[in-house]
Image: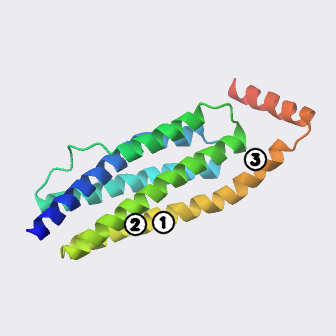
Amino acid sequence: MPDQELKELYIDELKDLYSAENQLVKALPKMAKAASSDELRQGFEEHLEQTKGHVQRLEKIFQTLGESPKGKTCKGMQGLIEEGSEATKEDYEGSVMDAALIGAAQRVEHYEIAGYGTVRSMAKTLGKDDHVSLLEETLEEEKETDEKLTGLAEQINTQANESGNEQPDEASSRDKKKSRRVA
């Protein structure tokens, strides 16, 4: 029965998203900690709370399906988080590190947008209207987050470019101030 196969795929895709969101709940605090921009740090912290809501919506969908959300690891998100983590281990500082974090975060958002768009379409086809509205709500939040990151990137990339054009004594003076703050 084709409808049953699509439902199985739908559940599998939801499990993948559930895993992805839970991985993100663990990764966002690390990204917030690595950010030097207060606005970016706050954005990561806000998205963490939003992501916890995404997990709850998915749990609600699984409850209505009578299915467990567990049992799958989202390898795509695992890879995206790993790449983002590598960026935090580079020698980037200040706005350059923030630009790297934004790049990693936007790749995550685009991955989630694709995933939620896919399951929303499946839910629609399966006649799961209550799921469609929950998935649409999450999809819209993911798109808004991506737009906010794009706006921040425009500011932060400009700052990163300007800091790269500083004269050597200006950069070393800034680095000395930064190391005093860290110590």
Choose the circle earlier in sequence order: 1 or 3.
1
Q: Which residue is drawn at 61% across and 42% down?
A: 35
Q: Position of residue 48 (x, y in %)?
A: 44, 50
- Dividing the picture into quadrants, the one containing residue 13 is bottom left
Can you name the residue that lies furthest to the front here? 2
In the rendered image of this protein, does residue 132 appear above or below residue 176? below
Mark 1 touches mark 2? (CB < 8 Å): yes
Q: Which residue in the protein does label 3 denote?
A: 160
Q: Residue at x 22, y 54 (%)?
A: 12
Q: Position of residue 42 (x, y in %)?
A: 56, 51
Q: Which residue in the protein does label 1 denote?
A: 143
Disc 1 element: helix
Query: Which amino acid lies under the numbered mark 3 shown in the image of this protein?
Result: Ala
- Dividing the picture into quadrants, the one containing residue 126 is bottom left
In this rendering, does residue 30 appear at all? Answer: no
Q: Position of residue 113 (x, y in %)?
A: 42, 62
Whole-angstrom CA distance, mark 2 to mark 3, is 30 Å
Can you name the residue that lies furthest to the left here? 1
In this rendering, does residue 156 appear at all? Answer: yes
In the image, taking residue 128 as reference, residue 182 lies left or right, namely right
Mark 1 touches mark 3? (CB < 8 Å): no
Disc 3 element: helix
Q: How crowded is mark 2: few (under 14 residues within 10 Å), some or many (20 or more)?
A: many
Q: Which residue in the protein does label 2 denote?
A: 139
In the rendered image of this protein, does residue 181 appear above or below residue 67? above
- In the rendered image, which quarter contains the C terminus? top right
